[in-house]
Image: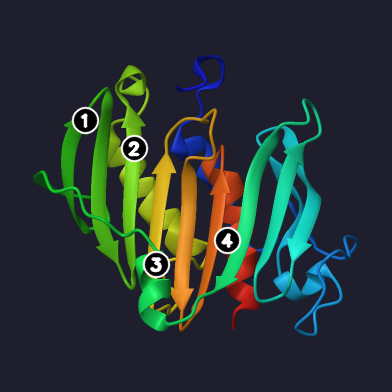
Amino acid sequence: MLRKQKLITAVATLAICVGAGVGLSKAASLISVQGDSATSTTQLSVPTKVDSDGSTAKASSVSGTNANAKMTYKTTDDNDTTATYQQQTKSSTDKAASDVSAATHGGQAVTLSNGTKAEEQGVMGHVILNWKQGDWTVTTVTDTSTLAHSAPSTVASTVSNQLKKNNITNQDVDKGAVTVYDTAQDSQANQISWQNNKKVSTVSSQTSDTALQIAKSALKGDK
């Protein structure tokens, strides 16, 4: 279910993330990851703190090894787990690719404001837009109750531009997938995942801008 009391359009939330390093604090304090030459979360290249829409998500736990690590984030106001970053090393590149969900949804052909060709369809109280952007498949989900504030194509155009400006979809990966909701979610439904060889990295978050900031940092560290 959507968190009705706190609707956040992608136009507003993703705009926060323009520019390098906004709201980010590099991982340096948690030192629970062991093995594969990892002695601290600095090897994960993800922030320990993300400021977003007036709230702060802080890294609360980290586990595993550098090859198979997981970090969770909790908000400082209600201590909810709001985001998760996970990197895994699979047994083969095929297995890694299969773990990155890049499904298309079909529908009516539309053109975003930047000229990107997309497909649009309505599904159970939502409007879904789907398109290819470099090595990535991008999906935006707009709640029909918020259509008076932002049209689905406007949300999608903003998301497309912000993904480029924040060096997400213009990064070369073997396979990448982005799913962004125009409102904050009770679950960690916003997701950015990508595959490089046998490695799969996944960011999941209740809000799109938090996911974007964590992914931006992690992708930069993959270089």
Is 76 situated left or right of 190 in this image? right
Give the label, 4 or 1, closer to the camera: 1
Residue behind mark 2: 141
**Mark toward the start of the polypeptide (3 vs 2):** 2
Q: What residue type is labelled 1?
A: Val
Residue behind mark 1: 123
Distance of mark 2 from mark 1, alpha carbons?
Answer: 9 Å
Name the residue nearer the viewer: 72 or 220: 72
Distance of mark 4 from mark 1, alpha carbons?
Answer: 27 Å
Residue 149 at what x, y percent from top left? 37, 23
Q: Residue 215 carries which label?
A: 4
Asked which secondary structure carries label 3, the reply is: strand
Q: Which amino acid does label 4 sit on?
A: Ala
Residue behind mark 3: 176
Reply above or below: 101 against 59. Answer: below
Residue 9 at what x, y percent from top left? 46, 32
Mark 4 neighbour class, 10 Å CA radius: few under 14, some 14 to 19, many 20 or more: many
Residue located at (35% from left, 78% from top): 94
Give the label, 2 or 1, closer to the camera: 1
**Mark toward the start of the polypeptide (2 vs 1):** 1
